[in-house]
Image (cartoon, rainbow, N blue to C red):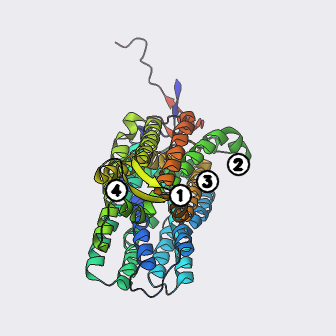
Amino acid sequence: MYKLSNAFSELDRAKLSWGHIKVMIVSGLGFFTDAYDLFVIGIVLMLLSGPYQTSFHLSGHEIGAVGASSLAFAMIGQLLFGKIADKYGRKKIYGIELSILIIGALLSAISWNFESLLISRIFLGIGIGGDYPVSATIMSEYANAKDRGKLVGLVFAMQGFGAITAVVASVILVSYLPAEITWRALLAIGAIPPLSVVYLRRKVPETPRYALLVSNNQEEAKKASKIIIGKEIRFNVGNNGINHLTFREFLEKYWKSLFIASFAWFLMDIAFYGTGIYSSFIVPQMISVDSIHMKILISGIPYFVGAFGYFFAAFLMDSLGRKRIQIQGFIAMAAIYLIVALSLVSNGKDVLGFYVPKYLAFLIYSLSFFFINFGPNETTFVFPTELFPTKYRSTSHGIAAATGKAGAALSTYLFPLALESIGIRGVLFILSGVSMLGAIISIWLKEPAGKSLEEITEEKVAIEVPISVPHPYSN
C-alpha cells in the first residue's frame, strides 16, 4: 500500500541546523550593506551640501537625485535578477549581484563631481536590487517549515547590524578625519561586507526545490539536501513534478497576492526610506545640536532603537505569524507619526516647538523605527518568498521588491522638497495616512506560517510512499 507525501517533507521537518545558519549568514551580508548604505548616504549628502570643506557641493535637487538614484535603479536589479534566477537558476547568478554592488561602492568613493557620484550610485543600486529576490528565495527554499520565517527574517535582519555599523563608523571618521576624506571612506567601507562572502555565494548549490521542480536535476537536489540535514535525499519526483505553469496562468491564479504584497511594500518603503535617509535632516529639528559629531550620533539613535525590531520580528515570525506582525506594525507607525505631528507647534513649515518635552517627542519618533522593523519592513520581505510557486518565486519577489523601491525612490526624491514646502509636521501627517492604508491592505494577505511552501502555493508535488502493513497473523 502507498500514501501520498510532499516530496520535500523531510526537508520541511528537518531541525534547525548549522547548514541553515550558514546559508542565512551568506545570504544576509548583502542586506548588511543595504542598511549601512541607507544611513551613510544621508551623512554623505549632509557633508556634501553643508558648510564643510569638500571637493564639490550638491544643490537641493542634486541631493534628491543622488539619494533616490540607487533606490530607483535597485528596481531594475530586482526585476532583472528575479527573472534570471527563475529562468536559469539561483546558483548560476548568485554572487554576481554582489560583484556589481562592490564595484558601485568603490566607484562612488572616488567620485569627483555630481555626475560621477550619480552614475556610481546607479551601479550600486542595481547590485543592491539584485540581492533581494535571489537571497530571499534561496533562504526560503532551503529552510524548514517550522523556522522558515525566522531564517528569512534573519537574512533581512542583518540590516540592523548594518545600520549600527554605519552610525559608529560615521561618528569615528568625522571625529578624526576631514570631511573630504570622511565621505569617501564611508562609501568605500560599503564594499567590505560583500567582498567577504562573494566567493562563498558562488559555492552554494542550487536549491532543492528549483533543482527538482524547474530544472529536474536530482544530483543538484541531493547536494543541497546534504548541506541542510547532513545526508543526501533521493527525492524521486520525476517529470510529473515539473512546474509547467505559464506566466499568464501564474498571473491569473496569483495576481491578488502579488498585488497586495507589492502594494504593502510600496507603502512601507515610502515611510521607511523617507525617514531613514533623511534622519540626519529631520532629527536636528527635534533635538538641537551644534557639532557634526552629535548631529550624526543623535540622528543614529532611531537606527539603534530600530535594530531591535528586526530581531523581535524574526524570532516571533513563526509564532505570531507574518500577517499579525505586519498589521500591528503599520498601525503602530501610523499612531506614532500622528502623535509626533500633533505634538508639534508649527506655523506653516517652520516648527516652533512641541506641546510635550522635545526629548519625549524624539523618543516617540524613534519608536517608529522599532515598529517599522518589528512590522512591515521584515514581513514585506518574507511574504513574497512564500506566497508564489517555485517557477515564479524569484520573479514575484523581484516585482514586489521593485514596487517597494518605487515607493522608496519617490519618497527619497520628494522628501527634501516636502520638508521645505509643508515642513516636518505635514510630512508626518502624510506618513501616518500611508501607514494606516498599509494596515488595511494587509488584511487580505494569506498567513503562511508553519506550512510547507507547496501547501501555501498549492503546488501538487507529491510522491508515493510505501506504508508497512502488519501481517494478518502477526501479533
Percent of width and height locating residue 48: 44, 79
Residue 273 lies left or right of residue 24; in this view the side is right
Query: Counting residues from the N terminus, which is met first, the one under dot 4 or under dot 1?
Result: 4
Q: Tell me the distance, in whole angstroms, between the alpha carbons under discs 3 and 1.
A: 32 Å
Which residue is labeled 3 in the image?
399
Percent of width and height locating residue 160: 35, 57
Q: Tell me the distance, in whole angstroms, between the alpha carbons under discs 4 and 1.
A: 23 Å
Three-letter amino acid code at the position of disc 3: Ile
Corner quadrant of residue 159: bottom left
Which residue is labeled 4 in the image?
302
Q: Tell me the distance, in whole angstroms, between the alpha carbons under discs 2 and 3.
A: 13 Å
Q: Tell me the distance, in whole angstroms, between the alpha carbons under discs 1 and 2.
A: 44 Å
Three-letter amino acid code at the position of disc 1: Ile
Q: Nearer the viewer, residue 382 or 11?
A: 382
Q: Nearer the viewer, residue 348 or 447?
A: 348
Q: Nearer the viewer, mark 1 or mark 2?
A: 1
